Image (cartoon, grey):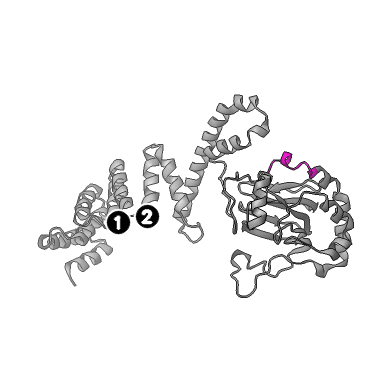
Amino acid sequence: MDRLGAATQARREGRFDDAVALLKAALAERPAHGPTLNALGLTLLDAGDAAAAAATLEQAVAADPKAPPLWLNLAEARRRAGQSAAEIAALDGALALDPYLLPAMLKKAQAQERLGDPGAVATWRNLLAASPASEGLPEPIRTALEHGRALVAAADASQGAAIDAKLADVLAAYPPEELVRARGYADHLAGRRKVYVQEPTAGHFPYLPAFEYFDRALFPWFAELEAGTEKIRDELLAIWSDDVEGFRPYVAFDATQPANQWGELNHSPRWGAWFLWENGVRNADHCARCPGTAALLERLPMLDHPGKGPTVMFSVLAPKTRIPPHTGSSNVRTTVHLPLVVPPGCGFRVGSETREWQVGEAWAFDDTIEHEAWNDSEEPRVILILDAWNPLLTEAEKAVARAIG
């Protein structure tokens, strides 16, 4: 067995003096050998001489400065020697080689926190953003990450309180409808809101604001739609009890298409749809069976996009079913919901804002922003979904969209 191997065995057995002697003899033959210097440093650290370990590991790093593990070992020795500032410098050495080296990020966040460095929050935030899911990680690391989350949350709450105090007079001076975007800006700065962007799967009409939910004032016809809720609901219940087969699975990828997040719902009746219009084509039979609903819809300014819209359907979400996060095809379209049957335990998220449906209260949202829905109840949930134009488009822009799709 060579000296390095013998020293490793002696270190495992707790014979630190023997290990140190063997390693120093090896270094006499190869004075700047990184692995041997590293082994000596770790042996000295195990023996309780952190200062000597740090000095030795500095030589190891000098011999092989592109080895992140050596920088991490040096940082640990400096930590045990009470050299916190020097510890951070060693961790920065490791991060200069690999900015996403999670052990170095974690140890730096902890060192900065011990020193009372306000930069610790930013380091924790970066670490949490880069960290994998906590499941499967060793318990000490999971505990450390939970601590980091709590620290970041506390910093965000403090920042949010300071922002709220600064904004109190401004918020009192202007009507709420003029402050929607400003509140989003403030909440983002305070760490209370993630800003989502439009991610259409097909056409992206540029320069349209990415509103998660649109202002009701942009849809003066909502009053007429909502006034028809009882009639629409009665017609829904009639066909629902009479035509279960007409409610076909909304998600229907064929075998040649990747289902991705839709695998669980693909061809499943747990999310069913009964179409009055589909891709711009009126279903005459279905409209005849819901005459009041069809007549009302035909009076509304629905999307008129040949081959594309409107699509109007009764959407049924089965109990204990979730629609996964996804985005729609184009932001020239706005999706409108009119809730008809909503048991407790149902919810809907668009971007960073979550709402609960209320029967008879319509809303419109940009479905090219990530959204999801759930029904945690024991009963089905049913809403009427219809397409309208994005209300921020001009008539000229609508004409362009109609012409080119």
Instruction: Please indicate whether residue 229 sits to the left or right of residue 127 in the image.
Output: right
Which numbered tag is attached to residue 39?
none
Asked which quadrant contains residue 61, the reply is bottom left
- Estimate the spatial distance between the alpha carbons at disc 2 and disc 1, rounded to whole Å: 9 Å
Quarter containing the C terminus: bottom right
Q: Are marks 2 and 1 in contact (CB under 8 Å)?
A: yes
When asked about the image quadrant of residue 286, the answer is bottom right
Q: Is residue 105 magenta?
A: no
Residue sitting at 73 percent across and 41 percent down?
216
Residue annotated with mark 1: 68
Q: Is residue 1 above or below residue 57?
A: below
Where residue 82 appears, as percent x and y from the top left, is: 29, 42
Judge whether residue 391 can be spotted in this image. Answer: yes
Residue 219 percent location from the top left of the image = 74, 43
Mark 2 falls on what kind of element?
Answer: loop
What number is the disc on residue 101?
Answer: 2
Q: Is residue 203 left or right of residue 124?
A: right
In screen coordinates, is 359 left or right of 279?
right
What is the x, y in percent for residue 91? 32, 49
Which one is in front, 394 or 339? 394
| Image position of 381 with respect to 251: above or below | above
Residue 324 lies, in percent from the top left, at 63, 59
* Relative depth, front residue between 103 and 39: 103
The magenta region covers 214-222
